Image (cartoon, rainbow, N blue to C red):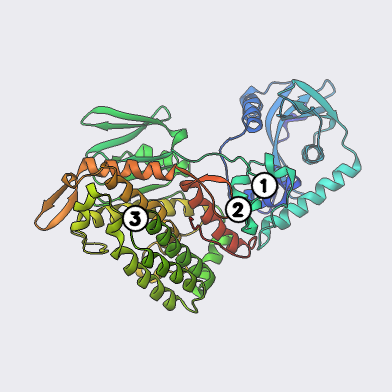
Amino acid sequence: MSTAVTAGEVPVDSVPISLVAHHAFCPRRAWLEASGEKLPVDSFAMTSETVAHTRADDPQASTAATVRAMDVVSSRHGFHGRIDVAEVLEDSSMRLIEYKATPVRRHPETTEPMRRQLALQKLALEEMGHRVVECAVHFTTHHRRVPVEIDEGTTTAALADVEATRAVAEGSTAPPPLEDDPRCASCSHVSLCLPDERTMAETPRRISVPNPDSQVLHLATYGSLATVKSGRVVVKHRGEVTATVPLERVQAVVVHGNVDLSGGLTRELMWRRLPILWCSSGGRLVGWASSADRPNGPARVEQHVASKRGDLHLARAFIGAKVGNQATLLRRHGDSASAVAALRQLASAAGEAQSVTELFGVEGTAARLYFTEFPTMLAPSARAFGAEFPGRVGRGATDPLNVLLNYTYALLTGECVRALLACGLDPHAGFLHSSGRNKPALALDLMEEFRAPVADSVVLGAVNNGEIKRSGFADLAGAVRIGDAARKALIAAYERRLTTEFTHPVFGYRVTWRRAIEVQARMILGLLDGTQEKYVGVRVR
């Protein structure tokens, strides 16, 4: 029996058959896959196919008559892959079977990409010494096997797809997204590609994407230990279990102060490409850890080149949106129409600035106006915070309101770091803030437009609603420190804000603030990979 022939070593430039299948569906999806953009199973079809492949993907389930999960390589044509099932017939020839899941309401019929995938698998098997006499697709949701005829035209087209896929994977720029194409509605990569959003205009349709929210795990009880057991994060404090969370629901872990993570949990998070961020007890972002397996390497290189060169367009968008959002928040909750009008003018001036230095001047003037009127947004019950407010003070703040702002800005910085890491971008290479100060410059750039509607809004809401009171702070030798209860209340309020939906001012659909931050990060990526011409910041009305 010829099944003793095995695949040889895969050449460095060999193209995966799965990537060819992605290219047949959409060249940009193949680019995303080649760039390392991976998604968890998130659709009915993908889930069904994964379940159906459980046995087909297990080589140990092979028998003398059925070969499963067999690696194949074509050194001659430069591609490789893995077949699902090959049935060995009486004359030692093979029947090649590919497993596919199809939505129940759709008729189980083969598509051209399926036929080309089988054609490549057949070519590889024949090059390895096997004789393939039949091919078929088994549709798992319909429990039906459909024979497939592989003719010379299909084989020629499949080989042409291999070369086209190789060109896309090795190309220096990303293919443009499809325009108003029905394939986007069922594409698993739509939340990464964002095809309709690239024009930075209201989208003609709302595409349902995986919801990443409610998955950032904050570890905020001092002295606690987080470990991993049976696929769950287990948090213990003084030997007692205080919380358990399934790893599948975790998108990132934020550690606050003196909290320990076990080596096993850290390793598991890195394997799953889930970032860990550490904050000090005062809320300062100390650092983060992320997997070395990150997407969009070429775009990251371009990011560093563009950062060195500078990008005034992006810098204008960041500051213009920031000042515009300050004006909106002050209009909604404050008591200074003249300051609001001045901030609107400064937001317009930011869009016409001729240098980054001029932009910083606009930003500084706006900050003085905004924070002078900031206490007017406090409710009467929270005026104690305003009485101690000396104006905006960063590190070294000695009043409760600035302590809250600093802590929340640190949380927002961490969220922007997480969003940028998800895109494969470097949080340190920015376009407005200088990388020379060894700060996460791009994260600081991105967070500008979200300071007022997210961070400032969280602080104002928490103190105005009485969630955080002045008694929640300790006065130590002239310094003010946030207490444990107030800190946890602030984190809870921050998470509620990030998972709150609003109507995106550019795209016109409902989106959470957390999702909006990642969308904006991907808009920056679009400028770098060449699929987008401009960037528009989020400005609330």
Q: Residue at x 61, y 40 (%)?
A: 208
Q: Image point 67% across, 59% down: which residue? A: 170
Mark 3 residue type: Tyr
Number of numbered discs visible in the structure rendering? 3
Residue ID for mark 3: 409
In the displayed structure, 59 sits above or below 485; it is: above
The image quadrant of residue 340 is: bottom left
Alpha-carbon span between mark 3 and mark 1: 48 Å
Residue located beneath label 2 in the image: 35
What secondary structure is found at the residue carrying circle 3? helix
In the picture provided, is 256 more to the left or to the right than 159? left
Residue at the farthest right position: 152
Q: Position of residue 350 (x, y in %)?
A: 47, 72
436 on left or right of 16: left
Residue 332 image-quadrant placement: bottom left
State if disc 2 and disc 1 touch (CB < 8 Å).
Answer: no
Q: Which badge, 1 or 2, is on the more N-terminal residue?
A: 1
Is residue 451 visible to us here? no
Distance between mark 2 and mark 3 Cα atoms = 31 Å
Q: Which is nearer the N-term, disc 2 or disc 3?
A: 2
Viewer-nearest residue: 320 or 464: 464
Q: Earlier in the sequence, mark 3 or mark 1?
A: 1
Q: Residues within 10 Å of mark 1 (few under 14, many from 20)?
A: some
Q: Identify which amino acid the numbered label 1 is placed on.
A: Val
For numbered disc 2, what is the local secondary structure? loop
